[in-house]
Image: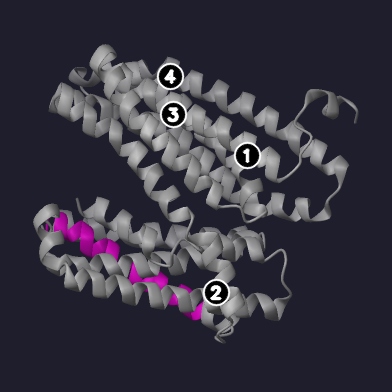
Amino acid sequence: MFGLLQSIVGVFSGLSIYGAIQREYFDLSSNEYKEYVGNCIIILFLSTACITIIIYLFSGFIEKISSINRNLFWIIVLISFYQFVILSLTAIYRAKMEAVKYSIFLISLTVINVGLSILLVAEIKLGYLGRIYAQLIAYIIIGTLALIILLKNYSIIKINYEYIKKALAFGIPLIPHALGGFFITMTGRFIVNHELGLEQTGLYTLGTQLGSIIGILADSFNKAYSPWLYEKLNKNDSGIKVKIVKFTYVYFILITIVSITLGLISSCLINIIASKQYHDAYSVVIWIALGNAFNGMYFMVTIYIFYVYKTNLLAIITIMTGIINLFLTFFMVKYMKLAGAALSFMIVNAISFIFTWYLSSKVYKMPWKMKEIWKH
């Protein structure tokens, strides 16, 4: 529950505007961009203050429904604050194509987090609190450094209501989008647990973890690809657009092949990493992997929606697919058991991708039709 609450608070901390920080890099002059980033930092502090007040006022209620000690709420607020700071700085590094700086920050965060977790959990025997404290310390150390760099090198703190309005118009529609994506991921586990029991939930969890390898690869690629694409789109060159579309189709084919391959070898992988009782988890891997492949395809087309600042469209798609996911997963688990939950995950992600692709083609014209590609 700690991780769930942290994910929810993290969505509201900074109001999901770190994506706007990367996007605006390609449109504003150096000083204008620093002022824009400064206003995003102002939004972060104000949103964190609001979150703190809300948690303080409803701490008793939140503690009751989550079974989390209220003293840990403030750790969640701090982690979410510094997480946004780190995301903002690394978004700038991605936009500037500074891969070394980007990697140093994220690797340092991971090393400190893992190192302290081993020390506090394995050596000092603090249990789950050791994991939480390790995460807090890691985020404070790296997050404070990131904040100093942001304030010193990349921001001018000067209130500009137009910039605030523009950043919020980009970020606020992404809140239901982020929450909906998390809801879609969790629905399968919840329904499997409710309908099939804890043992089947364990199998499903292992299968989703293996299948999520595709999601991790797709997300990593998208973080490198999106700033490159923004730069190319700014040139508004028809020849470049054709090359982008050709590459996108190749990506669709490759990620599908990799996902199917992972599904086919999943039985062997599970035999290596888990005991015999978890062997049946292989049956869900291929569907989870393909679901994550469709999500990777979704990343490739949703960038155009970000580019033209139409993020409100993503909220509509997420709400629609979230409702479909709830009923479809319940129905398919009832009749297809464990595989039904995984198949539902794949179908919902495919629907999300198709609708997003359609909407992106309407808000930003790209030569998606084959006859347009073959002309060049």
Where residue 371 appears, as percent x and y from the top left, is: 84, 23
The answer to which of marks 2 and 3 sits earlier in the sequence is 2
Mark 2 / mark 4, whichever is N-terminal: 2
Earlier in the chain: of badge 4 and badge 3, it is 4
Which residue corresponds to mark 4?
Answer: 263
Q: Is the residue 360 above or below the residue 119 in the image?
A: above
Quadrant where the C terminus is found in the figure:
top right
Residue 181 position, x and y percent, is 40, 43
**Eye-nearest disc, 3 or 1:** 1
| Residue 149 x/y as whole percent | 52, 78
Q: Secondary structure at mark 2?
A: helix
Q: Which residues are magenta?
A: 126-149
Q: Which residue is mark 1?
A: 359
Label 2, residues with CA under 10 Å away: few <14, some 14-19, many ≥20: many
Question: Where residue 165 is drawn, which disc sits there?
Answer: none
Counting residues from the start of the chain, the first of labels 3 and 1 encountered is: 3
Tell me which numbered mark, 2 or 1, is placed earlier along the sequence: 2
Are the residues at dot 2 and dot 4 in contact (C-beta closer than 8 Å)? no
Residue 164, numbered label: 2
Q: Nearer the viewer, mark 1 or mark 4?
A: 1
Magenta stretch: dominant secondary structure: helix
What separation in Å lies between label 3 and label 1 (alpha carbons)?
A: 17 Å
At label 1, which amino acid type do we have? Leu
Residue denoted by label 3: 348
